[in-house]
């Protein structure tokens, strides 16, 4: 017999599901093949945190990063081969290119009257999200309230704000004080002081881009700790628990923590992922990744396109997440079909369903397991074709 297997995904306003489906067709020869979901599909809310200027090898085992090493690493998935890209680092995450802009460049010069590096294109991630009706927001530590700062403010620097380079976010009416009051940009570029309240009220966006200030992102040495790495580690130890305890995270969230570039040369930088759907437990991926991998992952999570820049040629971050799949199909003994399902999210509801026409589905089994796998045996009768799917329900808040 030949088993034709394929994947479907079901989305709803208040639920996020992963589903697998395969078709059993009566034919003469063949063998079962696994049916797999996209492991990024269940993610509903993203928190992307940008740190600065540390190679991964400098962080791992460093006593100045006790929270990362003792708390985050044992519970997260992380990358061992995640490399930065040249030029303006943050733009890769938004547009899949650096537009030829150097890492130290700002969008404007001459008291913000010369738009030297300003981009008029609308081909970038957050515009894709907005056009698709998906909410987004950047939280910028030390940025002012209700105005777009395009130069610098306290320990905030504009080059760490990729959205400041795009006129569809900042507008074109820039003052000599290097500020803009363009409503769309003001609505989406917010001071980090608002983040805690938005988390608590469950009003965070679907896509949240978080930029600590120069003291908290490991860039500068600042009082009172006067230790770049310890400053950033301490900031993470304060902010990450706040996210993990939120409803947005617990109902389909994922936290991505990365660094913009290595401290020296071309060494790998860090990428840690925390999510109910991540493999976690200290899982270390050796897949080659770059910021384009993260951008591709965001486009896959939110189903927006076409691919930005070279994101279409990159490998997504799926290896860091569990992959729901029907990994084993066994016929017999007798008129039975045994299914082995792996990549399950512990604690959520799984429903095994069957159909003879792909339109009407019958629940065969409903369970919630504490492990990442389970098995099920069906005893079909008199069906020439039988369709199965496994649906994983992630309830909304």
Image: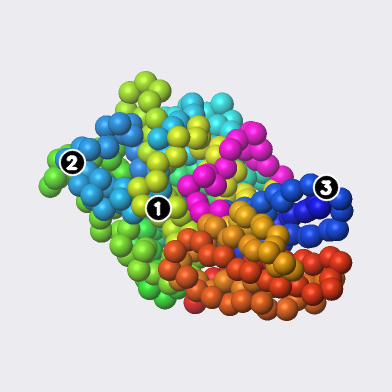
| Residue 336 in picture, x, y percent from top left | 70, 67
Is residue 82 shown in magenta? Answer: no
Which is nearer the eye, 390 or 293?
Answer: 390
Look at discs 1 and 2 and give the one toward the viewer. 1
* Residue drawn at the location 84% of the way across and 65% of the way down: 385
Q: Which residues are magenta?
A: 306-323
- Residue pointed to by mark 1: 280
Residue at the front extreme of this rendering? 334
* Frontmost residue, 125 versus 366: 366
User: x, y percentage for residue 108?
Assistant: 50, 36
What sort of colour scheme is used for the picture?
rainbow
Pointer 3 or 1: first along the chain: 3
Task: Indicate the position of residue 328 as horizontal and vertical percent values.
Answer: 62, 55
Give the label on residue 64, or none.
2
Instruction: Name the residue tied to disc 3.
Output: 29
Tell which of 246 and 210 is nearer to you.
Answer: 246
Give the structural element (helix, strand or loop) at label 2.
Answer: loop
How many other residues sit within 10 Å of disc 3, few (<14), some (14-19) or many (≥20)?
A: few
Does 86 sit left or right of 169 as displayed? Answer: left
Q: Is residue 329 above or below residue 14?
A: above
168 on left or right of 192: right
């Amino acid at each position: 017999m030949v088993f034709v297997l394929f994947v479907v995904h079901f989305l709803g306003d208040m639920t996020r599901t992963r589903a697998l489906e395969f078709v059993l067709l009566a034919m003469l020869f063949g063998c079962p093949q696994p049916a797999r979901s996209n492991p990024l599909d269940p993610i509903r809310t993203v928190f992307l945190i940008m740190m600065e200027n540390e190679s991964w090898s400098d962080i791992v085992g460093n006593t100045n990063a006790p929270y990362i090493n003792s708390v985050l690493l044992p519970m997260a998935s992380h990358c061992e081969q995640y490399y930065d890209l040249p030029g303006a680092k943050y733009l890769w995450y938004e547009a899949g290119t650096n537009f030829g802009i150097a890492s130290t460049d700002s969008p404007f010069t001459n008291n913000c009257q010369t738009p030297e590096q300003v981009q008029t294109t609308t081909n970038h991630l957050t515009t894709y999200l907005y056009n698709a009706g998906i909410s987004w927001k950047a939280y910028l530590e030390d940025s002012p309230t209700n105005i777009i700062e395009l130069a610098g403010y306290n320990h905030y620097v504009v080059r760490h704000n990729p959205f400041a380079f795009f006129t569809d976010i900042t507008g074109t009416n820039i003052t000599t004080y290097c500020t803009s009051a363009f409503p769309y940009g003001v609505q989406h570029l917010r001071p980090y002081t608002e983040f805690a309240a938005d988390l608590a009220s469950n009003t965070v966006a679907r896509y949240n881009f978080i930029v600590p200030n120069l003291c908290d992102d490991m860039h500068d040495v600042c009082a009172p700790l006067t230790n770049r790495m310890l400053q950033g580690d301490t900031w993470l130890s304060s902010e990450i628990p706040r996210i993990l305890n939120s409803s947005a995270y617990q109902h389909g969230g994922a936290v991505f923590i990365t660094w913009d570039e290595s401290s020296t040369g071309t060494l790998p930088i860090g990428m840690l992922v925390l999510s109910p759907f991540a493999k976690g437990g200290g899982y270390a991926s050796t897949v080659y990744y770059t910021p384009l991998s993260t951008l591709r992952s965001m486009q896959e999570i939110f189903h927006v396109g076409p691919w930005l820049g070279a994101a279409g040629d990159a490998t997504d971050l799926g290896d860091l997440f569990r992959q729901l799949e029907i990994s084993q199909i066994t016929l017999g003994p007798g008129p039975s079909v045994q299914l082995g399902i792996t990549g399950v999210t512990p604690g959520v509801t799984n429903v095994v369903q069957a159909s003879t026409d792909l339109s009407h589905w019958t629940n065969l089994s409903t369970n919630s397991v504490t492990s990442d796998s389970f098995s099920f045996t069906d005893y079909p009768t008199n069906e020439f074709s039988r369709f199965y799917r496994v649906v994983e329900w992630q309830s909304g808040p």
